[in-house]
Amino acid sequence: MPKIDLAAVPKDNSSRYLPPYHEPMGKRWNQRLAPAAGITDFGVNLIRVEPGGISSQRHWHEGEDEFVVILSGHAVLVDDHGRTPLGPGDCAAFPKGGNGHQLLNEGTVDCVMVAVGLPMKTPCHYPDIDLYNPGDGTGFRRKG
């Protein structure tokens, strides 16, 4: 049956960021829906960010696009253009290239969103912190 049982999809708030950049991720919960549905061509994640949490460190991908839909709650998109409030039904697109982005939950209730994109296979840059991910499966590295 195509319907996904969300209760059966594990929730994970672990982070692969190197210390100390992994700490802010403790308020982000991710459910990987694509593997649960047998989808392998692209990723689909249900993400819940608690108040005071962030979706990720601000980043941009050289070769992967990303797309986010806010389902409930509110977030502030922080990118190279500034700060943009997002609420239920709002969408944000991040074409591959150099616009570093992240979503902050500065509200008082959880923000729930769906994120769609390709698995990372090209370099990813983190302009605000001393990290870089070459996208080859070897993990994060310090830039300096």
Image (cartoon, rainbow, N blue to C red):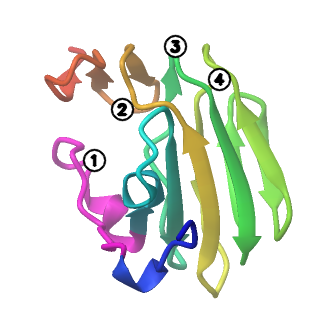
Q: Residue at left 53%, top 50%? A: 44
Tell me where the magenta segment starts and ends, as one range: 9-28
Q: Position of residue 71 (x, y in %)?
A: 73, 71
- Element type at mark 3: loop
Q: CA distance from mark 2 to mark 3?
A: 20 Å
From the viewer's perspective, is 141 left or right of 4? left
Q: Position of residue 21 (x, y in %)?
A: 27, 47
Q: CA distance from mark 1 to mark 4?
A: 20 Å
- Judging by the rendered image, the residue that carries numbered circle 2 is 129
- Element type at mark 4: loop
- Judging by the rendered image, the residue that carries numbered circle 3 is 63
The mark lying in front, picked from 2 and 3, is 3
| Label 4 CA crowd tier, 10 Å (few <14, some 14–19, many 20+) | some
Q: Which mark is residue 21?
A: 1
Query: Do the CB atoms of the residues marked 2 and 1 lie less than 8 Å apart?
Result: yes
- Label 1 is placed on what type of residue? Tyr
Q: In the rendered view, tell whether residue 18 sits above or below residue 144.
A: below
From the viewer's perspective, is 122 left or right of 66? left
Query: Do the CB atoms of the residues marked 3 and 4 lie less than 8 Å apart?
Result: no
The answer to which of marks 1 and 4 sits earlier in the sequence is 1
- Label 3 is placed on what type of residue? Gly
- Judging by the rendered image, the residue that carries numbered circle 4 is 99
- Element type at mark 1: loop
The mark lying in front, picked from 1 and 4, is 4
| Label 2 CA crowd tier, 10 Å (few <14, some 14–19, many 20+) | few
Q: Residue at left 39%, top 72%? A: 27
